[in-house]
């Protein structure tokens, strides 16, 4: 017979919360430097300045997406912990009903 699945629900929730926090922190950091990664507005007409601005815009877009994915991964862990707990509670209730018969 296989071993039962054991999940430390509070630990899983805690880890998920930490990961969500890291994603939120990355998003705050990206927002705090928006427009400053390549401040080339005063140097118009230079191909290098335009390329630097496009690169900065690309990085900001990438980092915002990454932050969102990190937060979503953390939330998925929290959701998994909640689902494990809910499943365990429902199984316990069914067991109690069967035992009461």
Image (tube, grey):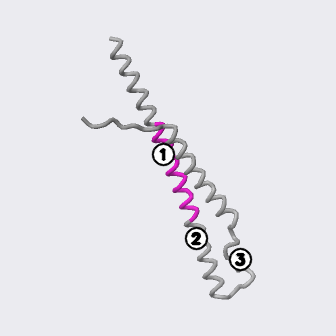
| Circle 3: element type | loop
Question: In which quadrant of the rendered image does the C terminus lie?
Answer: top left
- Residue at 48% x, 41% y is 79
Q: What is the distance, in whole Å, between disc 1 and disc 2 at their CAs?
A: 27 Å
| Circle 2: element type | helix
Look at the picture and state if 83 lies above or below 68.
above
Residue occupied by mark 2: 59
Circles 1 and 3, Cβ within 8 Å, touching? The answer is no
Give percent across and percent down for residue 53. Answer: 64, 77
Residue occupied by mark 1: 77
Give percent across and percent down for residue 33. Answer: 69, 67
Circle 2 crowding by C-alpha within 10 Å: few under 14, some 14–19, many from 20: some
Give percent across and percent down for residue 81. Answer: 47, 39
The residue lying toward the viewer, choosing from 88 and 10, is 10
The residue lying toward the viewer, choosing from 50 and 89, is 89
Q: What is the distance, in whole Å, between disc 1 and disc 3 at their CAs?
A: 38 Å
**Residues in magenta, as a range:** 63-82
In reply to whether residue 79 is colored magenta, the answer given is: yes
Residue occupied by mark 3: 39
Circle 1 crowding by C-alpha within 10 Å: few under 14, some 14–19, many from 20: many
Question: Where, by quadrant of the figure, is residue 46 drawn?
Answer: bottom right
Give the number of the mark in front: 1 or 3: 1
Give the number of the mark in front: 1 or 2: 1
Q: Earlier in the sequence, mark 1 or mark 3?
A: 3
Q: What is the distance, in whole Å, between disc 2 and disc 3 at their CAs?
A: 14 Å
- Residue at 57% x, 64% y is 63
Residue that protrudes farthest toward the left in the picture: 1
| Magenta segment, prevailing SS (helix, strand or loop) | helix
């Amino acid at each position: 017979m296989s071993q039962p699945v054991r999940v430390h629900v509070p630990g899983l929730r805690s880890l998920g919360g930490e990961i969500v926090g890291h994603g939120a922190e990355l998003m705050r950091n990206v927002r705090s430097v928006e427009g400053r990664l390549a401040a080339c507005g005063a140097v118009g007409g230079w191909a290098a300045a335009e390329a630097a601005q496009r690169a900065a815009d690309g990085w900001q877009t990438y980092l915002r997406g990454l932050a969102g994915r990190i937060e979503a991964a953390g939330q998925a862990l929290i959701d998994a912990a909640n689902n494990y707990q809910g499943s365990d509670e429902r199984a316990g209730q069914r067991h109690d009903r069967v035992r009461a018969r």
